[in-house]
Image: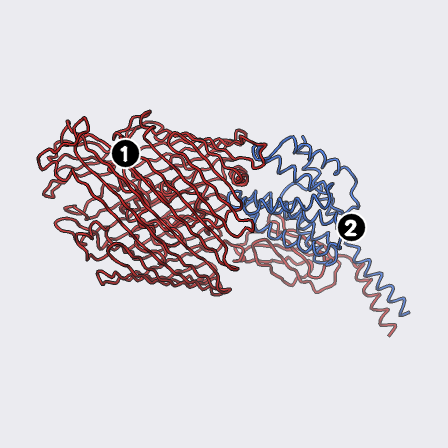
Chain colours: A red, B blue
């Protein structure tokens, strides 16, 4: 016994002192490329080495056989092999799918804000796009797929009209986010302040079955949860005055916010003459209130209310008579209320409940006046319809419930229903959607939405599919197909109440590559309209059309320090037979080529950001339809070319205060180069005269000072700078 | 004889275990002069091997975390994966620090703070808001546990230096922090393997 023990001991010691064994080999990936930096370790010992630039390694060990060698490298699955000293060992490592970014279903959509997977930009990026006026929808115009439309509101996406892109807040549709439209001027969006939202998705097609009533696009906004702390903000400029408070409860579980904005261009118009002449306003007041609270362990309740008021009176030269003016006056009051609740009723469940109420009242008066602005009533067909007073009162109520079940393996299933009660009709909708991870590199979304209109007694089924396939560690191929329906606007349904919904089918193919602060995205699409509204000879849904095109997006925030830019290009080919068109034509809101460049430069030492955006678009078609419907004149406008410049200087006016202020002095010029823009023409009744639709002033200037207290934007600022 | 055999075996085991110490010492001194990503990668691997071979000492996983954290600063595109690895390693080290050892816990929290900071600097737009405050919290803990910890002082200076004056950044304060850090860096380390990295970076900041 003793002998055995001694022998064992001697053997052990002998082995320990035996001459070292050489272990050599190479660590590669599947393609045979050496993995520099890979770690090789002999199991049960501290012996090992690091692979060199060719993946080669060599080390000596005194440990006894057998030799089990484990190689590991970040992003790869470790592998263990048997080794023989002195023999060249090849270890091949496979990529660990868990280390790759998950496949994100993203055909057709751009997302911003940290709530979204695969976000293209942050909410802060949206704010700082030069010339957007703090409007999310305006900032989205610098992304591919959107047209540069300067004479009316809305996002004109891929050959679609402005009303075909709908806005959603916390899941529910905002029936009319804009104040009542004004002729020849873009209207202001009352629910699009970027500071309200931290999830923004701009979809130019192929979006989820959870959203309906948008034929072409969707702007999906998610409001913020509880703020980090209480804060207050005030701001003043010649056109805008802002004040707001946001109070976080002591227990940190609820918050209350109130803010109000007042805007008027009346005084500005005295300094910088505008055409049309601003006799009153345009003046706006927007008051917002919000309440947010945690409910139970997982619940989040959000109540948002928005009260808007707008007034304006405009005069412009009458196109039919040089002696006369056209008067347009509008008074617009509206209320929007959104209540949403999100909770996790079980470990794998999520329940979203939402409701919203919208009330818009607009009193509009049109008239013809002499140069002294007294009303006149000229005779003749040319002046028919130019004098009118109308009131519109529109109420809508919506409710939505969505239940989501998270299945294992990254799959999820959601189902929901929705009701939209409008002034004339009720739409009931039900939808279901599944997201399936078929493979670590393949994700599929299958959905369907069914919508039923009570008035027409008609149901429409909209199937939707979206697929994402990873083609490399940083790239994806996406495809989407789906059907989309939308009711005609109320003014048409008042005349023809039972109209089927307009219908479009989207086909999208997308390639996205995102690596190291750079993003490249290319997307090709085909959109087919099977039903579109026609207004001549009568109101029907027999219109049709198509659009196809190619879009590119490039963003780079890495190449130059403190410099960030993106470039969007869109090619669009579209024809549609809609409204009063006598035949399929290129619509007057569709330019075949659009290019946008957005740049942001930070001067850290000066605490100043300089933003410049440049948008170019090919000319748009214009038409003059004779009263009979024939095309009397047509042509193409000159191209669109606008450079916007913005500068923001940050400082602290009262650094010694307990609640140090964060102050921004911002100024900007829209259309810096003063190029003349023509969006189209208004034609006289007899077609002999035309007047261009253009910007109200060549350049638009902005200056303002905004101060926030209590809010620490240090991180935001640092984020932009580091 | 049985006793002798037992003693010899015990001695052998002790010897085998302590054979690591020179390896650790060598790696620690290499860390003091490491510069390139390849240097840090090699060290990360070495410390990780030492950590797997010795499950009792907090230093090997601590150093493995330091090396991976350094890599996360140098290789921003891989920073999230590297910082996740470093976090795993520092958690192991933390669990091995004997209870009530403020100085060593200060080192742990300093590295935790550095790791969060590496995430911020990898993609400030996305990560700043999320990880910046956590980095600050860990740094405060580290400073509280050991006000003289030169690495915590250095990190504090680093943040002050890179923050614009408007936002509480202060180049003079940063310089004072670097100077104080350097004073403590110049004190000899408690042992050849005790945390001592960071001096070179600190000296560079003062030049």
Q: Are marks 1 and 2 on the same chain?
A: no
Q: Position of residue A336 (x, y in %)?
A: 35, 48
Going 26% across and 30% down the picture, which residue do you hit?
A279
Label 1 Cα crowd, 10 Å radius (few <14 / some 14-19 / many 20+): some
Residue A154 appears in the rendering: no
Residue named by callout 1: A639
Of all chains, the one bearing label 2 is B
- Front residue of A23 and B19: B19
- Front residue of B112 and A421: A421
Is B186 above or below relative to B47? above
Residue named by callout 2: B22
Going 8% across and 34% down the picture, which residue do you hit?
A379
Tag 2's secondary structure?
Answer: helix
Quadrant including the C terminus of chain A? top right
Q: Which mark is residue B101?
A: none
Residue A275 appears in the rendering: yes
Tag 1's secondary structure?
Answer: loop
Q: Which residue is situated farthest in the left direction here?
A: A380
B26 relative position to A321: left or right: right
Q: Are marks 1 and 2 in contact (CB under 8 Å)?
A: no
Quadrant including the N terminus of chain A? bottom right
A694 relative position to A465: left or right: left
Label 2 Cα crowd, 10 Å radius (few <14 / some 14-19 / many 20+): few
Q: Position of residue A701 (x, y in %)?
A: 37, 29
Is A251 above or below relative to A436? above
Q: Position of residue B184 (x, y in %)?
A: 75, 38
Of all chains, the one bearing label 1 is A
B83 relative position to B50: left or right: left
- Front residue of A366 and A272: A366
Q: Position of residue B178 (x, y in %)?
A: 69, 35
In three-dimensional space, the C-alpha distance between marks 1 and 2, rounded to whole angstroms, equals 74 Å
Q: Nearer the viewer, mark 1 or mark 2?
A: 1
């Amino acid at each position: 016994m003793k002998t055995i023990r001694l022998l064992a001991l001697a053997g052990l010691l002998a082995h320990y002192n035996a001459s070292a064994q050489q272990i050599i080999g190479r660590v590669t990936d599947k393609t045979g490329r050496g993995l520099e930096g890979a770690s090789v370790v002999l199991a049960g010992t501290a012996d090992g080495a690091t692979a060199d630039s060719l993946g080669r390694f060599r080390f000596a060990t005194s440990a006894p056989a057998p030799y089990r060698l484990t190689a590991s490298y970040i992003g790869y699955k470790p592998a263990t092999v048997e080794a023989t000293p002195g023999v060249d060992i090849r270890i091949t490592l496979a990529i660990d799918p868990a280390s790759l970014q998950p496949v994100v279903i993203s055909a057709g959509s751009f997302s911003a804000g940290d709530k979204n997977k695969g976000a293209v930009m942050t909410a802060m990026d949206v704010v700082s796009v030069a010339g957007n006026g703090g409007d999310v929808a305006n900032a989205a115009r610098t992304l591919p797929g959107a047209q540069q439309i300067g004479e009316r509101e809305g996002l004109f996406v891929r050959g679609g009209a402005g009303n075909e892109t709908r806005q959603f807040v916390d899941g529910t549709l905002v029936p009319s986010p804009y104040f009542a439209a004004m002729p020849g001027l873009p209207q202001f969006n009352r629910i699009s302040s970027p500071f309200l939202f931290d999830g923004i998705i701009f979809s130019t097609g192929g979006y989820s079955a959870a959203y309906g009533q948008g034929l072409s696009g969707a702007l999906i906004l998610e409001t913020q949860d509880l703020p980090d702390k209480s804060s207050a903000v005030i701001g003043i400029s010649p056109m805008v005055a802002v004040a707001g408070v946001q109070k976080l409860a002591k227990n940190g579980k609820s918050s209350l916010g109130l803010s109000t904005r007042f805007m008027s261009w009346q005084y500005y118009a005295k300094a910088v003459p505008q055409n049309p002449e601003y006799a009153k306003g345009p003046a706006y007041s927007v008051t917002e209130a919000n309440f947010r609270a945690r409910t139970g362990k997982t619940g989040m309740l959000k109540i948002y209310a928005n009260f808007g008021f707008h007034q304006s009176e405009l005069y412009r030269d009458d196109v039919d008579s040089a002696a006369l003016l056209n008067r347009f006056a509008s008074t617009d009051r509206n209320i929007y209320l959104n209540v949403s609740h999100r909770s996790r009723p079980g470990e794998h469940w999520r329940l979203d409940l939402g409701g919203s109420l919208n009330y818009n009242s607009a009193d509009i008066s049109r008239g013809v006046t002499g140069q002294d602005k007294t009303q006149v009533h000229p005779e003749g067909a040319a002046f028919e319809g130019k004098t009118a007073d109308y009131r519109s009162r529109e109420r809508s109520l919506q409710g939505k419930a969505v239940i989501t079940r998270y299945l294992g393996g990254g799959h999820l299933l959601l189902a929901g229903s929705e009701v939209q009660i409008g002034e004339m009709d009720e739409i009931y909708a039900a939808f279901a959607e599944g997201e399936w991870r078929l493979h670590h590199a393949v994700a599929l979304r299958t959905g369907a939405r069914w919508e039923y209109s009570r008035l027409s007694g008609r149901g429409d089924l909209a199937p939707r599919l979206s697929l994402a396939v990873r083609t490399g560690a940083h790239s994806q191929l996406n495809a989407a197909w789906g059907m989309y329906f939308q009711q005609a606007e109320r003014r048409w349904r008042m005349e023809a109440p039972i109209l089927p919904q307009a219908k479009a089918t989207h086909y999208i193919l997308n390639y996205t590559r995102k690596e190291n602060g750079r993003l490249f995205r290319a997307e090709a699409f085909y959109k087919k309209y099977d039903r579109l509204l026609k207004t001549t000879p009568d109101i029907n849904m027999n219109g049709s059309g198509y659009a196809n095109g190619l879009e590119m997006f490039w963003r780079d925030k890495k190449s130059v320090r403190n410099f960030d830019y993106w470039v969007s290009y869109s090619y669009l080919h579209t024809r549609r037979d809609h409204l009063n068109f006598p035949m399929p034509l290129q619509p007057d809101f569709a330019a075949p080529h659009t290019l946008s460049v957005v740049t942001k430069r930070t001067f850290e030492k000066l605490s100043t950001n300089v933003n410049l955006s440049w948008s170019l678009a090919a000319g748009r078609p214009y038409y003059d339809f004779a009263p009979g419907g024939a095309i009397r004149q047509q042509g193409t406008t000159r191209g669109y070319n606008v450079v916007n410049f913005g500068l923001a200087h940050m400082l602290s006016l009262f650094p010694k205060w307990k609640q140090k202020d964060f102050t921004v002095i911002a100024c900007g010029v829209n259309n810096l180069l003063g190029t003349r823009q023509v969006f189209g023409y208004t034609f006289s009744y007899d077609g002999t005269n035309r007047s261009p639709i253009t910007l109200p002033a060549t350049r638009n200037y902005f200056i303002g000072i905004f101060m926030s207290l209590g809010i620490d934007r240090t991180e935001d600022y640092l984020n932009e700078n580091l | 004889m049985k006793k002798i055999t037992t003693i010899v075996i015990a001695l052998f085991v002790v010897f085998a275990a302590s054979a690591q110490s020179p390896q650790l010492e060598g790696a620690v001194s290499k860390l003091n002069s490491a510069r390139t990503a390849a240097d840090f990668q090699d060290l990360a691997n070495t410390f990780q091997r030492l950590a797997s071979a010795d499950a009792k000492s907090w230093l090997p996983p601590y150093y493995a975390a330091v090396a991976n954290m350094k890599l996360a600063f140098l290789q921003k595109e891989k920073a999230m994966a590297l910082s996740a690895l470093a976090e795993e390693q520092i958690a192991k080290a933390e669990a091995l620090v004997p209870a009530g050892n403020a100085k060593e816990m200060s080192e742990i929290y300093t590295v935790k703070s550095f790791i969060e900071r590496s995430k911020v600097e990898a993609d400030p737009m996305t990560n700043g808001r999320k990880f910046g405050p956590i980095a600050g919290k860990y740094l405060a803990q580290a400073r509280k546990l050991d006000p003289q910890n030169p690495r915590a002082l250095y990190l504090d200076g680093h943040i002050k230096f890179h923050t614009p004056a408007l936002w509480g950044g202060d180049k003079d304060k940063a310089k004072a922090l670097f100077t104080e850090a350097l004073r403590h860096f110049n004190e000899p380390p408690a042992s050849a393997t005790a945390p001592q990295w960071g001096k070179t970076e600190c000296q560079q900041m003062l030049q």
